Image (spheres, helix red, strand yellow):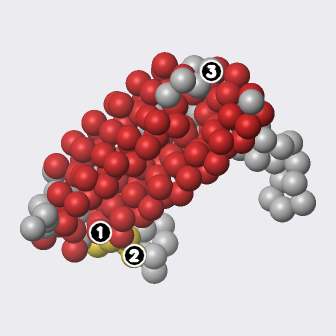
Amino acid sequence: MATELETYRRVLDELYAQMDEVLDGLTPEALVWRPFESSPWKGPSGQLGWIIAHGLSSTVYLLRLAEYCAGKREYSSVEGDRGRDEFTAADHEPTKLRERARVSRALAHDILAGFTPVELDAERPHPKRPERIFTARHSIVHALEHLSQHIGHAQLTRQLWALRQA
């Protein structure tokens, strides 16, 4: 039977494979395209490159938050895969975005490999709002669910792009 950490790693691999599938065959034009510019609900849609870049960055951010919970890093060093530069022009270049996804996946695996089952129960308060308690397990699960949500957004946007091209 797979351990909890093995399950997280397997799910992570499945999600990154879906991300790669979304990126396969895209053009730079596709990564900056928006299905619509305005909406009565929450304004404009996101660009496909932005959706993917955010998914990658937030995954690493949340896994590093799990490290903070387990006492493996300071809260001040909890950040995404590119630090504060979540979005750059490189996110509009399919080859570079695929490479970013590959590096992000490897980084996520390295982070998860540093955990023991006992450390999943670790918790720490937010440094400025001590009433807000973070847990390592929730941060890891949230990283997976958040990535999954943005992959779903990216898949739908990719479908709309394909319809536009047909």
Question: What amino acid does circle 1 point to?
Answer: Arg
Q: Which quadrant holds residue 120?
A: bottom left
**Whole-percent x and y of residue 60?**
39, 46
Please tell me how crowded label 3 is: few (under 14), some (14-19), or many (20+) other residues with Cα within 10 Å. Answer: few
User: Could you tell whether 104 is left or right of 162 in the image?
Assistant: left
Tag on residue 27? 3
Callout 1: few (<14), some (14-19), or many (20+) C-alpha neighbours within 10 Å? many
Question: Could you say which is closer to the camera, residue 121 or residue 22?
Answer: 22
Residue at point 45%, 80% (across, down): 131
- The vertical placement of 130 against 90, above or below, is below
Residue 61 in view (yes/no): no
| CA distance separating discs 1 and 3 | 37 Å
Residue 4 falls left or right of residue 32: left
Secondary structure, mark 1, is helix
Say which residue appears at 68% left-offset and 27% top-offset.
Answer: 30
Q: Name the residue under label 1.
A: 137
Residue 133: which numbered mark, if any? 2
Say which amino acid is labelled 3. Thr
* Residue at figure coordinates x 49%, y 72% from the top left: 129
Mark nearer the N terminus (3 vs 2): 3
Q: Is residue 40 left or right of residue 13?
A: right
Residue type indicated by callout 2: Ile
At mark 3, the secondary structure is loop
- Give the alpha-carbon distance from disc 3 to disc 2, as whole Å: 42 Å
Per the model, the C-alpha gap separating discs 2 and 1 is 12 Å
Q: Is mark 2 on a helix, strand or loop?
A: strand
Of the pair 109 and 118, the residue shown nearer to us: 109
Front residue of 95 and 58:
95
